[in-house]
Amino acid sequence: MLINNWYVAATSADITDTPFGVRMLGLDFVLYREPDGTVRCMTDVCCHRGGALHRGQVKGGCIACPYHGWEFNGSGQCTKIPAMGDDVVPPKRARIDTYPVQEKYGLVWAFLGDDEEANRPSIPDWFEPFINSPDWRVVRYNYVWTDTNWVRLGENSVDTSHPSFVHKAFGNRLSPKANIVPITETQYGATLTRERAAPPLANKSGAIAKILPKDRKTTRVTIQWSMVGLTEMLYQEMTSEITQVLFSARTPVDEYNTRSFGFQARNFLMEPEYDADRLKGLFAAIEEDHNIVRFVKPKLTPKSTTEEFLIEADGMELTFRRKVQEWARTRGVIDGERLAEELKHQVQVLASPTRKADPKGWVHRAVPRLDVPADIRAAE
Ligand code: FES
Ligand SMILES: [Fe+2]
């Protein structure tokens, strides 16, 4: 799983003065909100004897471990060890790793890695025009993709030829031939625009079926994605007036489960009473994808492209795999399967920027990174 990336840990509403535990990249984290509104994200494992901080309490700007009451401030430094008495200043080594946090789109993004601020990429701002605009009605969702590896999910969501088969409401089995269009690569992702055959109107259910013209031939789709936050935006122009925009960010829970947070914006049927109808359609599509990807084999993407039979229509998926490899090589990756095994008998913690700046004097070992040789390419 990739490190030195921003991942959505929770929604902003989730984070209060009650500790919130969340698993990301196969590791446990705790988040909480300080009285001034600042959100903190840190390892969930207490450096004393491994207490789970998310089971503790927030006290002012600190979090107190439920086991022996050690208190850690927002920088991860222990400020109080009750068993040593109030007059003892805890040693510097009594500290835990903490991670930078940003709130954007009403989501809490944690930077999971140790890169200094200048090297941290920006969270995509593509969804900004839609989030608080009177021209768009936005609904949000989150979803746990059980039994689904994050790369497998990424491949599915950039895949332009599966809708004909998987999605009844917007694919068209009678016209499955892929429209091969140029892919434009960006620094951390790619984008393309293509027309796809519209499904028969009879396949549409819900309120949208009543407003779409009967003679509609195509949907114009633009897909744009980035490795930063594992984000993706899909513009679906059903007619020149009827457009739906989907934005999502994905967070690996571990190597085999993935959580997504997203939004659907629409410029039609803007009244709130249509929200449930639109969400129903969205979840139907998500479940159609989930019922494909969780059964794909192998569970993790093959290391070599010769283990599959790839065709030209798979271009976006190959671009995605290549960007994953580039990130792994240049910014860092951890071996989720090995980590899960090692965590059974030893605490390992993702190295934070504070640890990188001051590497000596930490109780817990840092998760080892995987070396990715420069000549390994997942996709040629
Ligand atoms: S394990 Fe956290 S205070 Fe003892
Ligand atoms: Fe899909």
Image: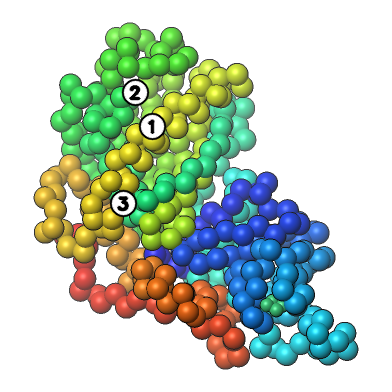
Q: Residues within 10 Å of mark 3 (few under 14, many from 20)?
A: many
Give the alpha-carbon distance from disc 1 to disc 2, as whole Å: 8 Å
Can residue 100 be seen here? The reply is no
Q: Mark 3 — residue?
A: 152
The secondary structure type at the circle numbered 2 is loop
Q: Helix, strand or loop at disc 3? A: helix
Q: Position of residue 339 (x, y in %)?
A: 41, 73
Gap between marks 2 and 3 measured at Cα: 23 Å
Residue under the image location 56 percent in, 76 percent down = 353
Quarter where residue 208 is shown? top left
Q: Quadrant of residue 65?
A: bottom right
Asked if the residues shown at circle 2 and circle 3 are in contact, with their CB atoms under 8 angstroms apart, the answer is no
Residue contact at pointers 1 and 2, CB within 8 angstroms: yes
Q: Amino acid at mark 3?
A: Arg
Q: Which residue is mark 1?
A: 285
> Looking at the rendering, which quadrant does residue 256 occupy?
bottom left
Q: Amino acid at mark 1?
A: Ala
Which mark is drawn over residue 60? none
Q: Is residue 351 above or below residue 322?
A: below
At horizontal 53% and vertical 54% (from top left) the residue drawn is 8
Residue 200 to residue 244: above or below:
above
Is 168 on the left or on the right of 207, as rendered? left
Residue pictured at 18% horizontal, 29% vertical: 176
Marked residue nearer the N-terminal end (1 or 2):
2
Counting residues from the N terminus, which is met first, the one under dot 2 or under dot 3? 3
Residue 169 numbered mark, or none: 2
SS state under label 1? helix
Other residues around mark 1 within 10 Å, as few (<14) / some (14–19) / many (≥20): some
- At x 47%, y 46%, the residue is 144
Mark 1 CB near ligand 2 (8 Å cut): yes
